[in-house]
Amino acid sequence: MYVVMGITGQVGGATARALLAAGQKVRAVVRDEAKGAAWRAAGCEIAVADIGNPYALRDAFSGSEAVFAMLPPLFDPAPGYPEAAAMIRSLRSALEVARPAKVVALSTIGAAAQRPNLLNQLGMLESALRELPMPAAFVRAAWFMENFAWDIAAARDTGFLHSYLQPLDRAIPMIATADVGSTAAALMREDWQGKRIVELEARQPVSPALAAQTLGRILARDVRAQAVPRESWQSLFVAQGMRHPLPRIQMLDGFNEGWIAFDGEGERRHGGTTLETVLAGLAAT
């Protein structure tokens, strides 16, 4: 039995689909029974558990060959990341008691960066799970190509892709969530001892200029990348409803200044899904 957290999201869903396609039994962890209906219909066993409840998580993880573990996205955390810290404690406690044969955890490029930024939360997750007695693998995924979903409407309506990634011609590692899921599913079925780090990216890094050019072909109109001025970020994020925008700004600075990057600490893997495939799918929805 393979247990998948976050199954209603993009990465967890992709992980479960890859396991099911390989003929494996999957237990889907959902927060309420209704969210698991589609996955039950797909052949999954359903376990209802919130990440803040270590006892329910323990039951969900028990008797499993592997657990795919992840934190829900936290884009506007309070100072010191108390929300992430509480969830990590609960997750680690459940894994310690349930003792699955192995754990595959979703992490991120830049998880080891020492400078303050939003991705420190995944560094905290790695540190906590490294102390577990069972084998664990951390998938340090590159920037998700699916993040461009927020830009489709503006590109279609105005011809501009507004970018916080700068300079516009600077390419960074990116990855499709489908490839993150297939990589996680493959790791769950592998055997190893100790702890592993897997750095995961597509074969071609992506710049905002390339994304705009690719989106223009898909939308059959001229699309240009346009930098969002750095001095406007704070006010824009606050206007969008963020209460604590600094970690997000620090993360963007890290990508733009180059100190959030793969450091070669782990093994490198590449996904096969192209930027054009992802953007075409986003534009069609």
Image: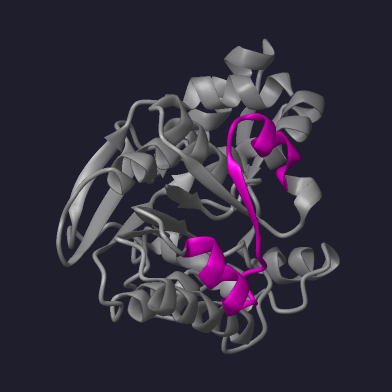
Residue 261 pos. (x, y %):
32, 59
Q: Eyeballing the image, is 258 above or below 46?
A: below
Q: For residue 147: magenta?
A: no
Residue 222 pos. (x, y %):
66, 18
Front position in the image: 167 or 97: 97
Q: Eyeballing the image, is 218 above or below 166?
A: above
Where, by quadrant of the figure, is residue 260 drawn? bottom left
Tell me if 232 is positioned left or right of 268 in this view.
Answer: right
Residue drawn at point x = 51 percent, y = 84 percent: 89
Q: For residue 38: magenta?
A: yes
Front position in the image: 40 or 124: 40
Q: Eyeballing the image, is 267 above or below 89?
A: above
Tell me if 41 is positioned left or right of 270 in this view.
Answer: right
Residue drawn at point x = 54 percent, y = 84 percent: 85
Front position in the image: 68 or 270: 68
Front position in the image: 118 or 268: 268
Residue 166, visible in the rendered structure: no
Where, by quadrant of the figure, is residue 43 drawn? top right
Residue drawn at point x = 39 percent, y = 78 percent: 96
Residue 243 pos. (x, y %):
77, 78
Q: In which quarter of the image is the C terminus?
A: top right
Q: Eyeballing the image, is 153 above or below 4?
A: above
Which residues lie in the magenta part?
Answer: 36-61
Where, by quadrant of the figure, is residue 86 drawn? bottom right
Q: State the scheme by which the image is colored.
A: one colour
Tell me if 182 is positioned left or right of 151 in this view.
Answer: left
Residue 153, visible in the rendered structure: yes
Q: Which residue lies furthest to the top in this view?
A: 220
**How many discs appear?**
0
